[in-house]
Amino acid sequence: MTQLNNKTNLQEDPDLGTFIAQGTTTDKWEVLPYNAPILPIHAALLRTGKVFFFCGSGNDPSRLNTPYDSVVWDVNKGTFSRQPAPLDDNNQPIDIFCAGQSFRQDGLLLVAGGTLRYDPFYGSPSALMFDPIAEKWIKKPSMNNGRWYPTVLTLGSGRIFALSGPDKDGKLNRQPEIYSVTFPNGWNAFPTTSPFPPYAQLFLLSSGKIFYSGAQMGGNSGVAPTILTLPGTFTQSIAEKVVPGLQDPDFGNQGTSVLLPPAQDQKVMILGGGSGSAATNRVNIVDFKATNPTYVPAKPLNYARMHHSAVLLPDRTVFVCNGSKINEDNRGAMLPAEIYNPTTNTWTAVAKQNVPRVYHSVALLLPDGRVVTAGGNRARTINEMRLEIYSPAYMSRSRPTIQTARGVLSYGLQFTIQTPQAANIKWVSLIRPSANTHSCDTEQRLVDVPITSRNGTSLNVTVTNNRNIAPPGWYMLFITDNNGTPSVGRWARLS
């Protein structure tokens, strides 16, 4: 089934101070002719271009302590490969339901935490890596305590930070920790912090500090949006500084937030969310280049949403889909998707989804510029297995092409991109692949790669020298023309 949306847009070119015609364009949704073999509660785009789904016990207490599925989806072939369940030291399956995840610099996905028991939920201390090449799980040293609904964030150093989530006794884990493969290796914990809520949405800032946006799962635990400054040793406490101004701060439950493109602008947007069963269309933005960063109102969403997803597109807009105006209820599902343009501070309604998706739904950008949506679990054992792909309007236009470009990048590197459309290219971008669950994605970010010079067939560009702007790891390299039409992405490793 396909939904189409035809329109002609005029978009201002900020460099020229003029308006350029986008032309007649068509965007569409397509429900795939096959289903996901598991409920895709967790989704990550691997550096192979394949999509990784896992769910652990999948919100089904009867499946606790049984083998759990994870699958790698080859989107181009429409096939799935299953992996054996990861096992603990007693040869029992590890339940990775409601874990946290982020990518290491080598492209392995770190998955930390999960479920020890249901109702009340106790968090698992387990830590695993998923190898995208071998397509298998690798067990790693456990955390110092359990975490259920944790947040995991890759730092500019390549180390990985874990925060919050109920521990192995069901109490909120207030001791952040860091995983490192260098000295001191393994997991090392800091002294306790404020009671940051489960799935607290975190962003690495250019300064190396961490920002909690106010979006989370289950309520804010009385904690306002906060900047965290990590100390030099694990014996020192993490410094906390509140960021003021957030409208309706109690409506961050099951909201989402993004680091607006490009990452160099250092603006974080929080959008939607709920309180109780009611959703909001509130949108606020904070500028971390300001002397005193403060949330300020932005154009609200067209539709109030919670459980929704926000995906950065290579044309430097933000695509929003999924969600409902009522907590975990398909009757209030928001089928129209919408796109935010940071340059004009406007939202545009686009084609409607065919499949309603609420709690436990995901969305992520594919290397070809399309967006995958999957999952949905409005009640236990009621699982949405259909897969749907959104093709933005730019997919129907003539697209620029990258003929050659480096696949290995370093900080501050100047390199050349060969493209026959060089004269008409506006932006070069590196987009970090998504790893998301529960409307939370600490991984995705779009990094500007400035064009320093060009000729008719090539672009000379320069990579940022700030590891906090672009943490080490694998990225998709895109070029985007003056009409806002991106190329297909090419994989490159930054280290």
Image (cartoon, grey):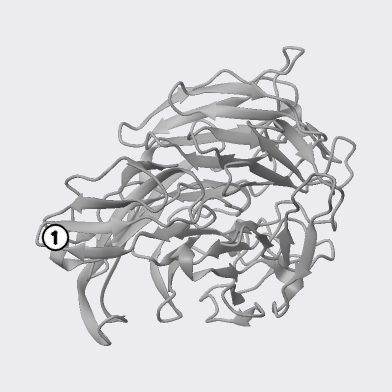
Give how far across and how far down residue 50 sits, in percent: 40, 35
Q: What is the tally of numbered marks visible in this picture? A: 1
Residue projecting furthest to the top: 91
Residue type beneath disc 1: Gln
Residue projecting furthest to the bottom: 17
Give how far across and how far down residue 340 sits, in percent: 44, 72
Give how far across and how far down residue 336 sits, in percent: 45, 66
Question: Against 432, is 227 above or below?
Answer: below
Secondary structure state at the residue bearing disc 1: loop
Residue 234, visible in the rendered structure:
yes
Q: Residue at x 49, y 56 (%)?
A: 466
Q: Residue at x 63, y 31 (%)?
A: 181
Residue designated by label 1: 421
Q: Residue at x 14, y 66 (%)?
A: 423
Question: Against 252, is 190 above or below?
Answer: above
Q: Nearer the viewer, residue 175 or 232?
A: 232
Looking at the image, residue 132 sits to the left or right of residue 90; the answer is left
Looking at the image, residue 270 sits to the left or right of residue 449; the answer is right
Q: Nearer the viewer, residue 456 or 10?
A: 456
Quarter where residue 29 is shown: bottom left
Q: Nearer the viewer, residue 29 or 115?
A: 115
Looking at the image, residue 493 sits to the left or right of residue 123; the answer is left
Quarter the C terminus occupies: top left
Residue 485, visible in the rendered structure:
no
Give how far across and how far down residue 96 sits, in percent: 67, 32
Residue density around tag 1, few if under 14, some if 14–19, many if 20 or more, within 10 Å? some
